Image: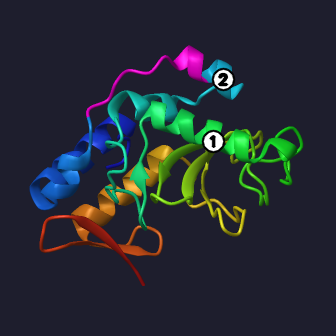
């Protein structure tokens, strides 16, 4: 697994799902190549290579279709889904959008949504995984945004590649990814058990 990039890891995850969790695999859509320049213009940040690559190989799922590919219960977003989620946050956090209640550096805590957090997966309700594009040594890390508490605490992964490598290793070896173990339900869905 050492040295695999986002596309290789995503492909291996999808192949594993097709064989072991076909219902989850069937929920995933093929990617629609995003206009990355348009995304960067709206987000007002340069997208890292990992994120660009994710959205060229991952097409998310259909509307209101959940596929818990990322632990503990997150469905990956397409670029279009990520943009819509980010726009929703901008609307919901208008009063604090220009001055969010967050520390300056990537990976640090925050208690309002930061414009430099790019959503990459959601739980179907309001919690999300976001890529943190604030400046600093942890730029590009993956955080878990908790809507009800309106906060992020600490990085879950140092980046998209490490997140996907952790998921792939968990699926293949049956070990935890973060604090969740992969299982497959009788009807063929991937499910993460928190232990």
The x, y position of residue 126, in whole percent, is: 56, 58
The quarter of the picture where the C terminus appears is: bottom left
Q: Which mark is residue 149?
A: none
Q: Could you say where residue 57 lies in the image, as x and y percent from the top left?
A: 33, 32
Q: Residue drawn at (32%, 65%), measured in percent from left and top?
A: 170
Q: Distance between the residues labelled 2 and 1?
A: 13 Å
Would you place residue 169 above or below residue 114 in this image?
below
The location of residue 157, given as percent across then percent down, is 55, 56
* 194 or 85: nearer the viewer: 85
Q: What stretch is highlighted in magenta?
A: 30-39
Residue at position x 41%, y 74% in the image: 180
Q: Is disc 2 placed on a helix, strand or loop?
A: helix
Measured from the top left, where is residue 193 in percent x and y?
36, 78
Mark 2 and mark 1 in contact? Answer it, CB < 8 Å. no
Secondary structure category for the residue under label 1: helix
Q: Residues within 10 Å of mark 1 (few under 14, many from 20)?
A: few
Q: How many numbered discs, if any?
A: 2
Q: Is residue 154 left or right of residue 166?
A: right
At 14% from the left and 65% from the top, the residue drawn is 188
Residue at image mark 2? 42
Image quadrant of residue 7?
A: top left
Answer whether residue 5 is visible to the viewer in this image.
no
Report the residue marked by disc 1: 88
**Nearer-N-terminus badge (2/1):** 2
Q: How crowded is mark 2: few (under 14 residues within 10 Å), some or many (20 or more)?
A: few
- Does the stretch in magenta take in 126? no
Magenta span main SS: loop
Q: Which residue is drawn at 69% across and 48% down?
A: 138
Residue lying farthest to the bottom in this orientation? 195
């Amino acid at each position: 697994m050492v040295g695999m990039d986002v596309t290789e890891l995503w492909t291996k995850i999808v192949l594993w799902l097709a064989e072991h969790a076909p219902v989850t695999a069937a929920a995933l859509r093929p990617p629609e190549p995003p206009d990355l320049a348009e995304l960067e213009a709206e987000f007002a940040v340069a997208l890292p290579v990992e994120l660009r690559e994710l959205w060229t190989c991952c097409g998310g799922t259909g509307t209101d279709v959940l596929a818990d590919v990322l632990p503990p219960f997150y469905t990956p977003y397409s670029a279009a889904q990520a943009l819509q989620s980010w726009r929703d946050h901008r609307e919901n956090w208008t009063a604090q959008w220009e001055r969010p209640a967050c520390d300056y550096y990537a990976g640090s805590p925050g208690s309002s949504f930061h414009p430099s957090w790019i959503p990459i997966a959601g739980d179907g309700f309001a919690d999300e995984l976001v890529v943190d594009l604030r400046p600093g040594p942890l730029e590009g890390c993956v955080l878990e945004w908790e809507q009800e508490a309106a906060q992020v605490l600490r990085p879950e992964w140092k980046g998209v590649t490490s997140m996907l490598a952790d998921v792939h290793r968990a699926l293949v070896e049956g070990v935890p990814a973060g604090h969740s173990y992969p299982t497959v339900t009788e009807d063929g869905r991937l499910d993460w058990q928190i232990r």
